Amino acid sequence: MSAPKLNVSDVATLARLALTKEETEKFTAQLGQVLAHMEALAKIPTENVPEVHPPDHPVLRKDVPSPSLPVEIALSNAPAQANDLIVVPKIVE
Amino acid sequence: MSLAHETVASLRRRLAKKEIKSRDIVTDLLKEIDAREKTIHAYTQVDRESALKAADLADVSLPLGGIPIALKDNLNATGDPCTCSSKILEGYKAPYDATAVARLRQAGAVFLGRTNMDEFAMGSSTENSALGVTRNPWDSSRIPGGSSGGSAAAVAGRIALAALGSDTGGSIRQPAALCGCVGLKPTYGRISRYGLVAFASSLDQIGPLTRTVEDSALLLSSLAGHDPRDNTTDPRPPETFLSKPTNSVKGLKVGLPKEYFIPGMDGETEQAVRAAADWLQKNGAEIKEVSLPLTPSAIAVYYILATAEASANLARFDGVRYGRRAADPRDVLDLYQRTREEGFGPEVKRRIILGTFVLSAGYTDAYYRKAQKVRGLIRQDFEKAFQGCDLLLTPTSPEPAFKLGERTQDPLKMYLADVFTISVNLAGTCGISLPCGFTQSNLPIGLQLIGPRFGEEKMLQAAHTYEQSHDFWKRMPPL
């Protein structure tokens, strides 16, 4: 595994981040260094090693309805709202 | 003496005997805050009126009745802001209590205020806060560590008795070491994380920062236990920690991992930590060298897994349901992108980019899955080490507090500050940092004891015994 060229603007689009030109250049250099540091992992043999996904005990709970936040409180932090709904820009033409 | 200089345990006893009132403690703490908070800047908010009011209503028969506690600003407490020291959560008010907060409330605690942190807990110096830097009470030109730097500086600076922090890669233990207080990272699954703003969910754990190990155990006893709202919490019944101190380390098997004593580490730190190991040996513990061979890979594993999880967890901050929203968005994509561009600071953006990259098509196997497997090997290293010993002893940080601004332009160097704490999160075990000495320039040095999963009791016993036989915890910062 040789260090891949990280295309910061493409990844920023995937991450829904608008970056300035300066940020893009800076992150490209800084994260290039960080990725180079990560290259060492490729040399560690990991055949037949299971991945770790904690915790070790079962995490699913019974699907039982229980009270949740009242609508008014749940919406109290919404930047824009009307009729108990959150207002967002139009997504369908 | 101001009550702000006492411990939680001693104040509990005095409250129970009715020698003092909770209001007296809050009043003394507020006086200390007035005197020193301007320099330290440990708090993002001090709850003067509500703390005094809660103090007057406190039931001192409860386990933490009338004891003021500060909360890291990433824990939801009903009606209070929860900024995560980020501009993106401007104006947000928590609509509910985190379970840890609710448990402290039930135990009678009084909330004193909210403490500063690296934005979204991403950092090792608290310099990544959008609300200003926090300064180390031992030397105001130095960082307090991070990300729970506000909590550590408040406790060490005598402007809080105890505080909650969160630890994803060392964010409780490293600032505790650098500020000279006690920081406990419990086993993954010990304390519910419901209502803690998530950073990396497979690693995050809430824990106390206190002046003594006894205080740490007191808080842990109230915080621990299963929570149906966080099913990663372990189902075992609640325990009371350190209820009968043994005050002995006789027969304790303590491992010194050779990879934690590395060339280039600070000489005074190494000396102080080795002296602690010698003390344990003189008092009947068996000290042996052990190996955790994958230690040098832990930073790389951590910064792949933690950023991957963060990139997913922070997707919720999109300007739709809460927090900041960019003005006059063109369309929904513009709303997301500009809200996040304006709201997040540089380190958070950097980590979102890295995390998105290691999860992107074509790179997942080489980075994310590879790191998960190496994490498995790191965990096996710890399990092997604990077959031959009860605890591991290491430095918490390779060096004492560094200067403000020294590393802000070099993220990789900043990441390396966590080299001794990160593996504990990856392995899911518990660790505690406590003072074990001072440098010649009077900066605190921290010792880390690491226990196996759910091995807090033995770890706290050993830490308490060591602490009470030394005076390091009593030393006052000059501020």
Image (spheres, coloured by chain):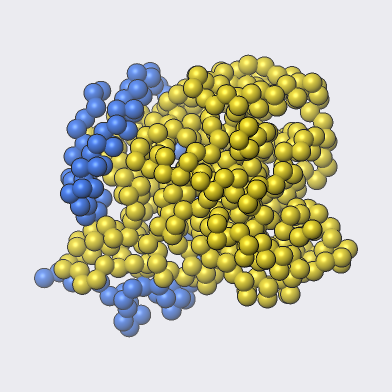
Q: Residue at x 76, y 21 (%)?
A: B281
Q: Position of residue B194 (x, y in %)?
A: 52, 57
- Left or right, A44 with respect to B380, comes to left
- Left or right, B475 with respect to B246, comes to left
Q: Is residue B126 above or below residue B472?
A: below
Q: Colour of chain B?
A: yellow
The quarter of the picture where residue B242 lies is top right
For this orientation, the residue located farthest to the left is A93
Q: Is residue B216 visible?
A: no
Q: Position of residue B41 (x, y in %)?
A: 53, 57
Q: Is residue B336 above or below residue B185?
A: below
Q: Position of residue B12 (x, y in %)?
A: 80, 58
Q: Is residue B38 above or below residue B224?
A: below
Q: Nearer the viewer, residue B140 or A27?
A: B140
- How many marks on residues? 0
Q: Nearer the viewer, residue B48 or A55?
A: B48
The quarter of the picture where residue B433 lies is top right
Q: Residue at x 54, y 32 (%)?
A: B399
Q: Which chain is blue?
A: A
Q: Is residue B210 visible?
A: yes
Q: Residue at x 79, y 28 (%)?
A: B249
- Left or right, A70 with respect to B353, comes to right
- Left or right, B67 with respect to B384, comes to right
Q: Position of residue B14 (x, y in %)?
A: 84, 60
Q: Quadrant of the N terminus of chain B?
A: bottom right
Q: Is residue B414 above or below residue B156?
A: above
